[in-house]
Amino acid sequence: MIRWTRRNWLVSLALAAAGQSIIVNAGQVRPKKRELDREKGSRPRKLALEDYEPKSMLHVTETTVPRARFPVIDFHTHLSWSGRRGQVAEAHNNATPQEVLPIMDRKNVRMMVNLTGGYGGVLEQTINYWQKPHPDRFLVFTEPWFGKITEPGFPQFQADQIARARQMGAGGLKVLKTLGLYLRERITSGPLVKIDDQRFDPMWEAAGAHRMPVAIHTSDPEAFFLPTDRFNERYEELSAHPDWSFHGKDFPSNRELQEARNRVMTRHPKTQFVVLHVGDAENLPYVSELLDRHPNMHVETGARIGELGRQPRASRKFFDKYQDRILFGTDAVPRGDDTPQQVFGERLYEIYYRFLETEDEYFDYAPAAKPPQGRWRIYGIGLPEKILRKVYFENAERLLGLKS
Ligand SMILES: [Zn+2]
């Protein structure tokens, strides 16, 4: 008996179209050998996944949104990093204000929050470079002095650094995923330091006392915790950045990391936390649960419209329900070419605006030839003006204590 699988059926159709017959044996459909050989000759060569750049044939609306409908506060950018020159710590700027400001003006970006301002002398340099000359356009956050964790008295020292940073003009505290995934008891060796380690309690409290929101990046996409194999939906991204994989070794699970951060939010109810990258953008039901449970929690969108935009109906409901707790952010890095979804520039902002403001369908989430985070495209969620205003600037303005 022939089992008419879809494959058999397609083969028979193709042969019939070519005026050829098929041999039917018990249990299978097989083209004649001669026909098979002919077919082989015309078969296209194997195509490597990395070379595949399919162009969508959909005839759909393409809206260009050159300017945001309301002035934007980009809550998540990296205009500088902490670096070193020899033994001396030094701010490394990824661009100059003169390069960045005209793009901001054209895209209706009123302010960029530079999260990675560092601490101590580097923080001071960064504030002097970006914020002092343009106080209404750039705001700099400070970061914890993790290198001092081995020293006695660190908890109070770090709390005092927060007060000092505030005095210098820092707008908040940024905590990278370093906490939970990289920082160890002897900095680079020993057991990983947990996010809810009590040595940080005075720091979280100080941030609250000085009205500095904490922008915290915890964990990473769920696929980063799975083997980089053919089932991994971020296979190409992890292949391009093997060091982004947290599969195996002594890494905690994504959920353990998230739960440790949740305990911090519970312990410090007067401190406002902005959970970066939507927390766990693949799992909006979980993030919703957390927002319900933690009134001091907010989320930010940086580098996650690829996730939000591939579940547009769930995202639209999420934005509706939590419209007072979502902040616009891009995670933009000037010249950040190895993360195409974050390269600062006009195209990046246009994609975010298109996602938030239009109902366009099936478009790229990154300014790149291939979708860099995963092989999918996104759909706009067409937010109404009231929500757009909140997400673009009102929520950030309130948290940062800015007055328009
Ligand atoms: Zn970032």
Image: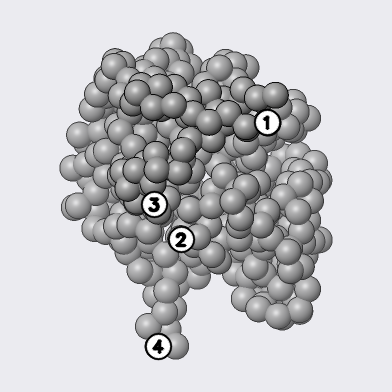
Return the x and y of residue 10 as percentages of the image width and height: 48, 25
Identify the mark nearer the N-term, 1 or 2. Answer: 1
Mark 2 lies on residue: 240
Mark 4 or 3: in front is 3
Q: Mark 3 and mark 1 in contact (Cβ < 8 Å)?
A: no
Mark 4 or 2: in front is 2
Element carrying mark 3:
loop
Label 4 vs label 2: CA separation? 30 Å
Identify the mark nearer the N-term, 4 or 2. Answer: 4
Return the x and y of residue 114 as percentages of the image width and height: 41, 51
Q: Residue 142 — which label?
A: none
Point out the image quarter for the N terminus: top right
Mark 3 lies on residue: 46
Element carrying mark 1:
loop
Mark 4 lies on residue: 86
Identify the mark nearer the N-term, 4 or 3. Answer: 3
Identify the mark nearer the N-term, 2 or 3. Answer: 3
The quarter of the picture where residue 86 lies is bottom left
Dot 2 alpha-carbon crowd within 10 angstroms: few under 14, some 14 to 19, many 20 or more: few
| Residue found at x 44% / y 26% | 21
Q: Residue 26 — which label?
A: 1
Q: Amino acid at mark 2?
A: Ala
Label 2 vs label 3: CA separation? 21 Å
The residue lying toward the viewer, choosing from 269 and 63, is 63
